[in-house]
Image (tube, grey):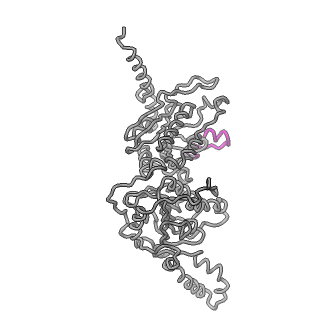
Amino acid sequence: MSDSTPEQVLNDRVRVAYNAVSDEARAEKVAKQHGRGKMTARERVAVLANGGFHEFGALAGPGPAQQGAAPLVAPGDGVVTGIGYIDGRPAAIAAFDFTVLGGSNGATGMAKLDRCAERALLDEIPLIMLMDGGGHRMQEALDSRLAAPGSQLLLRLADLSGHVPLVAAMMGPGFGAPANISACCDFVTIVRDMGTIGISSAPLVQAATGENLTNDEIGGADLQAQRGVVDMVTSDEQEALDSIRAFLSYLPPSAAGQPLINAGPHEAGDGAETIDTMIPASMRQAYDVVEVIEAIADIDSVFELKRTHAPNLVTTLVRVDGRPMGVVANQPRVHAGALDAHACEKAAHFIAVCDAFGLPLLILIDLPGFLVGAGAEETNLVRRSARLGYELGAATVPRFVIVTRKAYGAAYIAMGGGRSIHADLSLAWPTAEICAIPIESAVDLAFRSQYESAPDPAQARTDLITLFKANVDPLLAADGFGIDDVVLPSATRPMLAEALRRVKRRPPRVPQKRRSISPI
């Protein structure tokens, strides 16, 4: 006869229930996950939430299966949810569990995810989703009664967008709902040779189109990084979780907060001592703009996003004097830094994220213009280039614009050059060349008949180019007050540091307006 009290019996029942959903109680499933080279959902949460994790919904079970399907066994309904502390700051975390029905999305699991989103909204903290598996759970999907209500998750994510940071990590199959969820996020990381992302997996693609593809061929990590679907590819899960921690370190917990300022002293990055000679005077000579950014920013603070997508433009988070900011820079090593549709879209999204969370923007301009031609027009460049200017114009955070070298025509305006966006600092370096069109092209377009009728056409063309180049000088740009100043590259970092301490966010330009309408 047991000596346990009724209270002890009740407590033991709760302990048994919790033990049943633990990794220790599911050794076979855990071993299979480890055999795939993966952590379990709970192990991932433990690594990410280095300050502790307060779980909710651990005892939740699956809803009723549809008629004709066997009763479901799904501990926690395949998702671990709760509030975790990352470097001392809280975040709502949902980790999908591939060991439970392939991480598929059941009604209860989606309710738990919605609960995470609700806490993120009310507590004004980031929402982080660690994806592994997912998509509709077939045992619950083939029933009109269960499917008809749809899901309010995208509505919830729309509420959270721009209010709190949204983060997704693709750490396994990520087709269907996980792909839609990640598309709403501000930062998406994926593990190479482990994570995939796409609308439909290989079996469904083959059934629908007859294409015989693998999941990696449809939505592999490096492939989707090149397409701009994800922001960062990592070599393993630890690196992916570290990248989430790093990304969040630049942002406040919500749009209502202030970005964290790192305590000093703040050392300049690599190349700071040679930055005055880093930009070649020759417009035909390329250089790596990332090295320029590193020379301006605090040491080891450059966190580049979408590195392999639209590489003609760089988007990166940095710190200057300990203060986080975003940098958008043309990359002369690719297409001479010219803007195409992908680069414009990449920059526009990044600018929106920075503006939402109060990160000032530094724009570094060195470009010959837009990429042109029938191929460029097929990419909807007209609207996507307008989206870049639209986001810069709508931004209320401090914006600092520097012409480092080439700055021509409408692309110069789209990048916010001169007085185009009322930048808080509008500067040029001594190597800057600002005009409506490259001199050589202008001479060939407007003065061809003049130099071809000369006794020596080649010399006449050269003379015209030399004549007009004398008018293209950053000192003339400053003389007409089209920019605030011409400064040495080495003077830029202290100028930015001073401005970051002083300049405030601006109010909306048209406060009574309900919303703007994006070009795309």
Q: Residue at x 42, y 62 (%)?
A: 500
Q: Residue at x 65, y 66 (%)?
A: 373
Q: Residue at x 61, y 37 (%)?
A: 151
Q: Residue 121 appears at what percent x and percent y?
A: 51, 42
Q: Residue 195 appears at what percent x and percent y?
A: 51, 43
Q: Residue at x 59, y 40 (%)?
A: 176
Residue furthest out toward the left:
265
Q: Is residue 419 above or below residue 77?
A: below
State the extent of the magenta-drawn residues as a range: 202-218
Quarter of the rendering containing residue 388: bottom right
Residue furthest out toward the top:
1
Q: Is residue 123 left or right of residue 520?
A: left
Quarter of the rendering containing residue 86: top left
- Tell how many labels: 0
Nearer to me, 140 or 501: 501
Q: Is residue 86 above or below residue 471?
A: above
Q: Residue 298 appears at what percent x and percent y?
A: 38, 60
Magenta stretch, main secondary structure class: helix
